[in-house]
Image (spheres, rainbow, N blue to C red):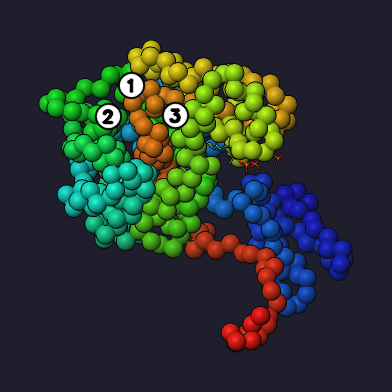
Amino acid sequence: MADTLTITDNRTGKQYNLPITDGTIKATDLRQIKVDDEDGGLSTYDPAFMNTSACRSRITFIDGDKGILEYRGYPIEQLAEHSNYLETAYLILFGELPTAAQLTTWITEITFHTMLHENIKKLMEGFQYDAHPMGVFLSTVGAFSTFYPDAKQIFDEKSRKKQIHRLIAKVPTIAAYAYRHSIGRPYNYPDNDLSFTGNFLNMLFRMTELKYHANPVLERALAVLFILHADHEQNCSTSAMRGIGSSHVDPYSAMAGAAAALYGPLHGGANEAVLRMLNEIGSVQHIPDFIKRVKAGEGRLMGFGHRVYKSYDPRAKIIKKTADEVFEVTGKNPLLEIALELERIALQDEYFVTRKLYPNVDFYSGLIYQAMGFPVEMFPVLFAIPRTSGWIAQWEEMILDPEQKIARPKQVYIGAARRDYVPLTSRS
Ligand code: CMC
């Protein structure tokens, strides 16, 4: 029979025909296969969701074997070359590239929401001087839910749109304040005459000058990096956004959780970890020894490997080119030599070749950020700013999807069987 999977239960001889749709069977269809009359039916065991689709999505397409990444059908290479971050964010959120009029309105709407409430500033001032900016970032995003209680109206389209504008517009301001806080400098207010990335650089780096003008090459490089990081389908932080959002909490609270997931060194914290690794290696002579240790299981080659890409990450290719443009302006990052040699050696090494471990987006992004003057602690924050568009697009898609419910994976219980409570005095 076409488009069905026939399963024969050897214990009972019964046959089950499960429909195949879009290359998947429905996990709940397995429930009809019973082990005995009492049980809830067969289920799948899939730690880390290695082979389970949890949603149907129209936002981002990835072919990990071929190294393809598309937002709403547009190849990442074309967007990185021709688009800018706000246009790409519009595409991701609303499904189509904006017309000229739509883009003007969108930019105006975002620009009008870049300021933070003064009490948010006070809240941020309460953090220790050495607080990690990503900790400050995710806490502040969570605190937004108390400033915008209207965000609870998640089924009201107008309210959702308002939160979208606020989130896209305000995350660079939070990020810049977190950075200024960490270096003990006064916060810079947004300058609405500037581009999205131009204004961000202004809030980060303006000193006493009345008007800040970023170097156009760096302003553009940051826009390209933001485009590359805007969405990446069902990764760890996006799954967190969808999972938390499935309880119908407001998007700020959900996004605080997504940002927390991004903070981890296996996800958005990897670019920070790459820089620390390169510093630790210190010189090209130490690379063979470092590779040996990685192969012996003593740590990972950070910035290498990906759950989905089993070939060169297409984002890493674009970033390598952007790095050259940035280094023309800033001078070469001295760690670049180590990174290039590390990549060359790893790509020839049987350990990495057989496991299909290639450089991912984070391998070179940190080198660019560092050359642009960002401290390593800011790297995950720089990932979170553009990923905000992906998170909220995925969140909204989930909210509007009639097939979605509150997320609740099953478990296979392997703990103690039922037993009676033992009073404290009788325990040995
Ligand atoms: N260095 C050394 N060995 C590695 C690495 C690495 N970076 N990545 C995977 N492996 C090995 C791993 O030890 C395992 O070997 P074996 O089969 O002998 O046990 C095999 O490759 C498969 O690894 P895995 O951990 O099962 O793969 P995964 O899909 O669960 O992990 C990953 C994906 C990205 C977490 C992992 O490759 C990793 O830890 N990379 C380093 C961290 C990193 O760069 N993260 C950024 C990801 S891209 C940005 C983002 O989207 O967040």
Indicate the position of residue 211 as horizontal and vertical percent values: 15, 25
For the C terminus, give its image quadrant. Answer: bottom right
How packed mark 2 is, by other alpha carbons closer than 10 Å (few <14, some 14-19, many 20 or more), is many
Mark 1 or mark 2, earlier in chain: 2
Marks 2 and 1: in contact by CB < 8 Å? Answer: yes
Q: Is residue 305 left or right of residue 141?
A: right
Which label's residue is closer to the chain start, 3 or 2? 2
Task: Please tell me which residue is depicted at 73% across the width and 26% down the height of the picture.
Answer: 350
Check disc 1 and give the amino acid type. Leu
Amino acid found under the numbered disc labelled 3: Gly
Q: Nearer the viewer, mark 3 or mark 2?
A: 3
Say which residue appears at 64% left-offset and 48% top-offset: 50
Crowding near pointer 3: few (<14 within 10 Å), some, many (20+)? many
SS category of the residue bearing label 1: helix
Residue name at image x 46 percent, y 45 percent: 262
Residue 364 visible in rendering: yes
Three-letter amino acid code at the position of disc 2: Leu
Crowd around label 1: few <14 · some 14–19 · many ≥20 (10 Å): many
Which label number is shown at residue 218? 1
- The quarter of the rendering in which ligand 1 is drawn is top right
In the picture of the structure, the residue carrying the numbered disc 3 is: 366
Quarter of image, res 179: top left
Residue 201 is marked as 2
Element assignment for label 2: helix
Could you say where residue 117 lies in the image, as x and y percent from the top left? 19, 49
